[in-house]
Image (tube, rainbow, N blue to C red):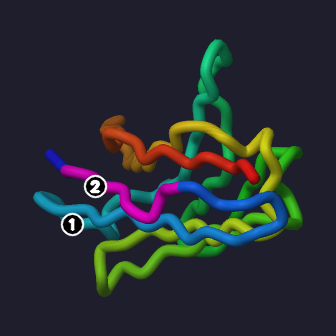
C-alpha cells in the first residue's frame, strides 16, 4: 500500500505562487497510471485540481487551468503542483491522489493552502 505525504502548503498572498509536493513510499510510484491533486474548501465538495496520466496527458479543473501546472518525477517518487497567480478562492486543503489498475487508489492526508492578504 502506497503512503502519500504532501508538503508545501501555507499562507500566500493573492497573486503569489506556491509549490506543493507529494512524496510516495511503500510502493512503486511509476506503477500508478494516474496521479493528481484534488482540493476541498470548507463547506464544499472535493474537486479536481489537476491529474496527469501516463506521464503525458494532463487534465485541469476549469478554475485553475492556465495558472497551475502539474508534474511528476518517477525517479524521486514525487508529484508536484506549481500554483501561480493564486486567488483567495484557491484556499482549500489540497490532497494528493494516485490510481492504478486493480483498481487501487490512495489519498494523502492533505496540506492546507490559504490565500489571503
Quarter of the rendering containing residue 51: bottom right
Report helix, strand or loop for mark 2: strand
User: At 32% from the left edge and 39% from the top edge, which residue is drawn?
Assistant: 109
The residue indicated by pointer 1 is 28
Q: Which residues are magenta?
A: 3-10
The residue indicated by pointer 2 is 5
Q: Residue 54 at x, y = what percent?
A: 54, 67
**How many labels, in total?**
2
Q: Is residue 73 above or below residue 96?
A: below
Q: Closer to the N terminus: mark 1 or mark 2? A: 2
Q: Residue farthest to the front?
A: 117
* Nearer to us: label 1 or label 2: 2
Q: Quadrant of the N terminus?
A: top left
Q: Residue 95 at x, y = what percent?
A: 46, 43
Residue 111 vs residue 58, the one in the foreground: 111
Q: Residue 14 at x, y = what percent?
A: 80, 58
Q: Is residue 19 left or right of residue 17?
A: left
Q: Residue 41 at x, y = what percent?
A: 63, 28
User: At 40% from the left edge and 42% from the top edge, which residue is drawn?
Assistant: 110
Residue 94 vs residue 96, the one in the foreground: 94
Q: Is residue 83 above or below residue 100?
A: below
Q: Is residue 25 left or right of residue 72?
A: left
User: At 83% from the left edge and 65% from the top edge, which residue is drawn?
Assistant: 15
Amino acid at each position: 500500500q502506497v503512503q502519500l505525504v504532501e508538503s508545501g502548503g501555507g499562507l500566500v498572498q493573492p497573486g503569489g505562487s506556491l509549490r506543493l509536493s507529494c512524496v510516495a513510499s511503500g510502493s512503486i510510484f511509476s506503477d500508478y497510471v494516474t496521479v493528481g491533486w484534488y482540493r476541498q474548501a470548507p463547506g464544499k465538495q472535493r474537486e479536481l485540481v489537476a491529474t496527469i496520466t501516463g506521464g503525458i496527458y494532463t487534465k485541469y479543473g476549469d478554475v485553475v487551468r492556465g495558472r497551475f501546472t502539474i508534474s511528476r518525477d518517477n525517479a524521486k517518487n514525487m508529484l508536484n503542483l506549481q500554483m501561480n497567480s493564486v486567488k483567495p478562492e484557491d484556499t482549500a486543503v489540497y490532497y494528493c491522489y494516485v490510481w492504478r489498475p486493480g483498481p487501487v487508489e490512495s489519498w494523502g492526508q492533505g496540506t492546507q493552502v490559504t490565500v489571503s492578504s
